[in-house]
Each structure stands twice: as C-alpha cells, then as structure tokens.
Amino acid sequence: MTDFQNSYGRLARFYRTLAMSLALISSGMALAAAAGETVPDKNGKLANKVALITGAGSGMGREIALLFAKEGAAVVVADIDGISAGKTAETIRNARGQALAVTADVAREQDVSRMVDTTVSTYGRLDILVNNAGIFDMLVPAGEVIDELWDRVIATNLTGPMRVIRKTLPVFEKQNGGVIVNTASIAGYTGARGGGAAYIASKHGVIGLTKNVAFNYKDKNIRCNAVAPGRVETGIRANSEKLAGAQTLHDATVSRWKDIENAVTAGYVTNRRKASPDEIAKAVLFLASDDASFVNGSILTVDGAWTAY
Ligand SMILES: NC(=O)c1ccc[n+]([C@@H]2O[C@H](COP(=O)([O-])OP(=O)(O)OC[C@H]3O[C@@H](n4cnc5c(N)ncnc54)[C@H](O)[C@@H]3O)[C@@H](O)[C@H]2O)c1
C-alpha cells in the first residue's frame, strides 16, 4: 500500500468518526428537544451561577428549577418529597444541565443546614436562593384553626425561609454578594382571598421578612425580593393535604368552611384564568438575574391584575 493510500485511509476514517460524533450529538439534542427540554445556554442569564430552590419537586419550584438550568445555572433541587425532587433533577440532567436533588424539610433546622452545606460542598458556592416551598391551609378561619395546622403552615412558609436565609447569608457575605427570591403570594397583602388565617399570616410575614433582609444587607451586595402570585395551576391543595394532615378542605368540623369558600371564590369572577407555573418562573428569573440589579426589597405581583381590581 502506498503512502498516499495510507493517508487517504486515515483521512476517510477521521471524517467517518467526525460525522458519527456529530450525528450522535444532534440526535441527543433532538431527544432532549422531543422531551420538551432545552439544553442549557452557556451564555444564559444565570451562566456559572449556583441556585438552591426549595419545593422544587412540584409546581412553581419545578418550573423555576428547569428555567434556571436552561439559563445556565447549576441547580440544587430541594424538596421534602425526595422522589419528586429526584425527578426534577433527572429531567435537568437528561437535558445536559447540572442538578442535584436534596431531600429536605425546610421546617427542620438540621435539614436546612445540611441542604445549604451540601450545595456549597457540591458546587463550591451558592449565588441564588429561592425560598419557594410552601403549603396551603385550606382557608380555615382563625376561630377554628387547630394548633397543628397553624404550626405546620408557619413553620413551612415563614420560619423555614428565615432559617434558610440565616444559614445562607454568611455564604453570600463570604462571596461578596448573592440573591434571594421568596415566593410570597397576594395572600401576603390581602385579607382572605388567598388563604385562611395561618396562610395569610405566613405570607404577610414573608413579605416583611423580604423587606427587612433587603434593607439590612443591601450594602453587602445582597438583594432580597419576593414574587407574589395570584392563582396558579399547581397541585398545592392535594400536596398540602398530604403534608399538613388535619383540617383538610372538606373537613366537616370547620363549620363555616362552605361560607368562606363561597365568599372567597366569588372573587374569582374578577380573575378567571390561573397562571401556569412557568409564567411565575419567568418573573422569578427576572428577580434572580442581573436584569434586576437595582431591584431590592420589592414584591413583584404576578396575578393577571386580580388585585388591581
Ligand atoms: N398555587 C398557587 O395558587 C399559589 C399562589 C401564590 C403562592 N403560592 C406559593 O407558591 C409556592 C409553591 O407552591 P405551588 O403552588 O407550586 O405548590 P406545590 O405543592 O406544587 O409545590 C410545593 C412544593 O413544596 C414542597 N414542600 C412542602 N412543604 C415542604 C417542606 N416543609 N420542606 C420542603 N419542601 C416542602 C412540596 O412537596 C411541593 O413539592 C408556595 O410557597 C405557595 O404558598 C402558590
């Protein structure tokens, strides 16, 4: 065989391998696209950032995690339900994103500590915290709420975010900055249309906490904002029934429940469409990204003008 034939053979083999690799890459991308996933953008709004999102196994948290990963962030998907957290993380990894699932109950101090420590030990830093985990209280009024429900709602929706923030702030200070986005609700500034006594009180608390953190840490390059959704299409009622247990929506022991439900839902006529979770995720992305560099201590209402009425 001549030298010419040898080099020609090598060149042909090289081009065959190159063509096969390109075909494999594009078929992988096609598979990801077919699954409704988008390969992470290395120049995305959150490129090189590390984000910790609580309650990311379902609903809005899941959509926030998928969107953040698509924008280039490495995402820690935390949830009390480890199976759902695992599924969100797997979806991100299947689309070639970076994600780690952590099973954690934000109402437990030791879980909060482990969740933040795991984030930093895995990815070396933490840039964005989204306090999204939450449960609903089925509209139970103050006269009938039992301690078990009150305590669980406040522990999850208010004490949890405070503890995660408390654990995260030293990490942010060491890194010279960071961003917090809390999932509040229009229940954080309305009286009844978004929840019962415990839920309304917890979300009012989240809004106060957001502003307090924003002001006290603004000079350390730390921003803290909240998103306040109206009604959103998620499984929050069913998930909360499982987690909060007592006093469910149809609990006959809550005597005025039907009247309250009727009065609250009467207001739905001014807001017939629920948001889809991804519409909330886009607002959270804005607050988490540098696009919102001077937005601090703000509550971004995303309710399709429900509270504008
Ligand atoms: N769905 C709505 O209409 C609506 C409106 C305004 C605000 N919100 C708020 O949005 C956030 C997300 O709710 P969603 O509607 O997506 O509900 P969801 O039930 O779909 O998601 C909430 C997730 O939080 C997790 N979670 C609950 N308790 C937890 C705990 N102690 N520790 C860790 N994870 C926990 C659940 O397992 C679930 O995966 C909540 O804070 C909720 O209060 C919801």
Image: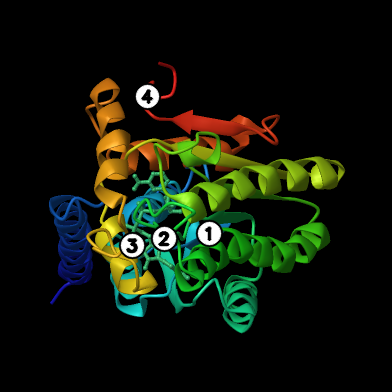
Q: Which residue is mark 1?
A: 157
Q: Which residue is mark 3?
A: 92
- Left or right: residue 36 versus residue 168 is left
Task: Determine the residue positioned at 26% across, 29% down.
Answer: 266
* CB at disc 1 and ligand 1 closer than 8 Å: yes
Q: Amino acid at mark 2?
A: Ile
- Left or right: residue 53 versus residue 215 is left
Q: Is residue 168 above or below residue 71?
A: below
Q: Secondary structure at mark 4?
A: loop
Q: Which residue is mark 2?
A: 135
Q: Is residue 216 visible?
A: yes
Disc 2 versus disc 3: nearer the observer:
2
Q: Nearer the viewer, residue 204 or 26?
A: 204
CA separation, marks 2 and 3? 25 Å
Task: Determine the residue positioned at 19% across, 50% down.
Answer: 36
Q: Give the image location of residue 182, x and y in percent.
A: 56, 49
Q: Which residue is mark 4?
A: 306
CA separation, marks 4 and 3? 33 Å
Query: In the rendered image, which quarter contains the N terminus?
Result: bottom left
Does the residue at mark 1 contact the one at mark 4 (Cβ under 8 Å)? no
Q: Which circle marks residue 216 in the picture? A: none
Look at the image and name its color scheme: rainbow
Q: Amino acid at mark 3?
A: Ile
Query: In the rendered image, which quarter contains the C terminus?
Result: top left
Query: Of callouts 4 and 3, which one flags the residue occurring earlier in the amino acid sequence?
Result: 3
Q: Secondary structure at mark 3?
A: helix
Query: Quick one: label 4, few (<14), some, or many (20+) residues within 10 Å?
Result: some
Ligand 1 placement by image quarter: bottom left
Query: Of callouts 2 and 4, which one flags the residue occurring earlier in the amino acid sequence?
Result: 2
